[in-house]
Image (cartoon, rainbow, N blue to C red):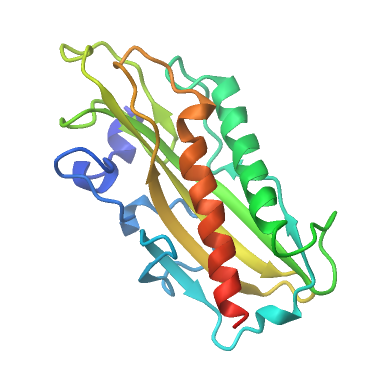
Amino acid sequence: MQMKRWAVPVCALALALSGCSSNEVSPDEYSGFLKDYKVLKKAESPSGAPVLRWIQPGVDANRFTSVYIEPSQFYPQPQPTEKLPANTLRGITQSYDQALKTAFATVLPLADGPGPNVLVVRAAITAVSASNKGLRPYEVIPVALVAAGVSVATGIRDQDTSVATEAAFLDAGNGDVVAEVVRKGAGYELDNSAQALKPGDFRGVLDAWASDMVKSYQQLKR
């Protein structure tokens, strides 16, 4: 089964409130969206969350006069499921786009596309999962972005949700990657395993990611 092929260690996948959870992304969870993972180093986001990131040495953030937010995407592209329906997939990327635009618009004018002195934000959602609260995830395929609503004996338990992202920041003038980040976040708690994931379950974490990205950019300008 494809689930076994893409399975990852439980503690590397589950997030936030479960007993063995971790906010850190392990190398076997990388999606392939970014060009170079070898340069990533453990760091702390402005909000205090653990992240993996790389910033081009000596990058001059002051040269960017506007920012272009590329439409975010799932990577790789998932197939909708009963637990993760198509409208939720669309809603998550739409919410991510809006969060990034709203946050970056506070520090830079939004551009309609790449161009000289434009910072390009290229982001992807690389994992979505749901796991029984305090227990092992019951069926999660992070690379395929599937959180399956299978019938389990503990289906009445609350469930934790999590989502992961990878993002690259490019200088549109020369195409150089000036920064990369990989991180996870916790979504809202579900009532039980039968409850389908909704875009709103992840809105808070998407807003937090966008806020941290902008604060990191501001720190580079000092």
Q: Quadrant of residue 49?
A: bottom left
Report whether residue 33 is seen. no
Extreme residue in the front direction: 106
Q: Which residue is painted at 32% across and 53% down in the image?
A: 28
Q: Quadrant of residue 189?
A: top left
Q: Quadrant of residue 221?
A: bottom right
Report whether residue 5 is seen. yes
Decide if residue 146 is on the left or right side of residue 175.
Answer: left
Image coordinates of residue 92 in percent, x first then y, are 56, 34
Closer to the camera, 195 or 218?
218
Closer to the camera, 48 or 181?
48
Image coordinates of residue 30 in percent, x first then y, are 41, 54
Closer to the camera, 128 or 143?
128
Decide if residue 62 is on the left or right side of residue 92.
Answer: right
Decide if residue 79 is on the left or right side of residue 22.
Answer: right
Image coordinates of residue 81 in percent, x first then y, are 47, 19
Q: Which residue is painted at 50% across and 54% down in the image?
A: 166
Q: Which residue is painted at 71% across and 62% down in the image?
A: 120
| 92 in relation to 175, above or below | above
Closer to the camera, 115 or 109?
109
Q: Quadrant of the C terminus?
A: bottom right
Extreme residue in the bottom direction: 58
Q: Quadrant of the N terminus?
A: top left
Q: Which residue is painted at 27% across and 33% down in the image?
A: 4
Image coordinates of residue 74 in percent, x first then y, are 56, 40
| 98 in relation to 65, above or below | above
